[in-house]
Amino acid sequence: MKGQEGKPIWIVVTLLLALVVGISMYQLMNQTNAQETFGNWLGEINAGQVEITLTSFCENWADSGFVRTAVNQDELAKASVAAAHPALTIKYFLQEEFELGERLDPCDCAVFLHNKGKMSLLDARSRYDPDDCHAMANEIAESTDIIGR
């Protein structure tokens, strides 16, 4: 009888161990998928289309008032990769930020659009917040008239 009383404990321990292994595998697969996603998007964006892709996305988002819920998440991911694309002369986003799960912010788009002459200084300043912009966009904003040197 004593031997049979210990069996339920081993069943519980085995189930818990299986759960831990399953969660670990899930996290590992998610991390691998995040790294592949940047490479996949990078391969889909033609070097000659980088600026057009980013401009189009940011202009459309600005036209919608930078409403976050109106944004297609795949398009946001693609635009984020375009902002970090090696073919872009001035980058507004970093691959490391993408891999951490971050995406372009309205602030980043405002800095980009103003830098391209597609957004007024007043509109860019109203959207600029150094806490929302990513590192590269902040550096660009600091070197331009957005901050109001």
Image (tube, helix red, strand yellow):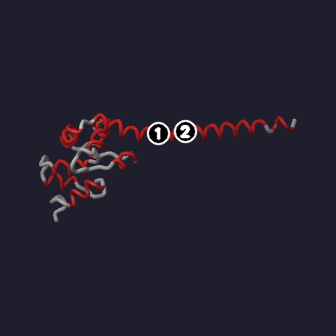
Badge 1 is on which residue? 30
Q: Residue at x 29, y 36 (%)?
A: 75
Q: Residue at x 75, y 36 (%)?
A: 8
Q: Is residue 75 left or right of residue 27?
A: left
Q: Secondary structure at mark 1?
A: helix
Q: Residue at x 63, y 37 (%)?
A: 18
Q: Quadrant of residue 72?
A: top left
Note whether residue 57 is visible: no
Q: How many marks?
A: 2
Specify the amino acid type for callout 2: Met
Quadrant into which the C terminus falls: bottom left
Specify the amino acid type for callout 1: Asn
Marks 2/1: CA–CA distance: 9 Å
Quadrant into which the N terminus falls: top right
Q: Mark 1 or mark 2, which is nearer the start of the sequence?
A: 2
Badge 2 is on which residue? 25
Q: Farthest bottom residue?
A: 149
Q: Position of residue 124 (x, y in %)?
A: 18, 53
Q: Residue at x 25, y 48 (%)?
A: 106
Badge 2 density bin: few <14, some 14–19, many ≥20, Cα 10 Å: few
Residue 59 in the image: above or below residue 91:
above
Q: Position of residue 134 (x, y in %)?
A: 30, 53
Q: Quadrant of residue 53?
A: top left
Pick the residue in front: 142 or 86: 86
Q: Is residue 6 left or right of residue 16?
A: right
Q: Secondary structure at mark 2?
A: helix
